[in-house]
Amino acid sequence: MYTPLMPNGADRFAWAQYTIKVSNRDAVQARLKEAGIPSNVYYPRPMHLQPAYLPFGDGEGSLPIAEQLSQQVLSLPMHPYLQQSEIEQICAAVIAATTD
């Protein structure tokens, strides 16, 4: 796992999301839920396939990487009040969910 970089002198930030890429998102999300770790898929459909943007793009298949990632990304708990023990619990659950 990679930790977001914090500028020198900064002791807290309020990142909105910590998103990871996994090959089996639904299974990983289910395993995290079983472990009591909340997760969310904020963008299940890439921007160019959102109804408001359909007239401006070339439709499905036009941005294959964005479409692929929209099926693989999952956001983990992220807020400035996470305790080290909670971070370790989340990490352990992600590792367990992605290595089976």
Image (spheres, rainbow, N blue to C red):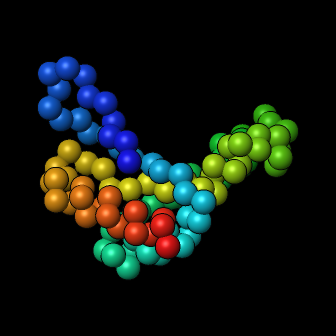
Position of residue 80 in the picture relative to residue 99 (left or right):
left
Considering only vertical position in the picture, is 2 above or below 8?
below
Position of residue 65 in the picture relative to residue 39 (left or right):
right
Q: Position of residue 91 (x, y in %)?
A: 32, 58
Position of residue 55 in the picture relative to residue 17 (left or right):
right
Q: Residue at x 68, y 43 (%)?
A: 66
Q: Position of residue 96 (x, y in %)?
A: 40, 69
Position of residue 36 in the picture relative to residue 71 (left or right):
left
Considering only vertical position in the picture, is 39 above or below 7?
below
Q: Position of residue 28 (x, y in %)?
A: 49, 68
Q: Residue at x 44, y 69 (%)?
A: 97
Considering only vertical position in the picture, is 65 above or below 95?
above
Q: Position of residue 60 (x, y in %)?
A: 82, 49
Q: Nearer the viewer, residue 12 or 99?
A: 99
* Residue 54 visible in the shown view: no
Count of picture labels: 0
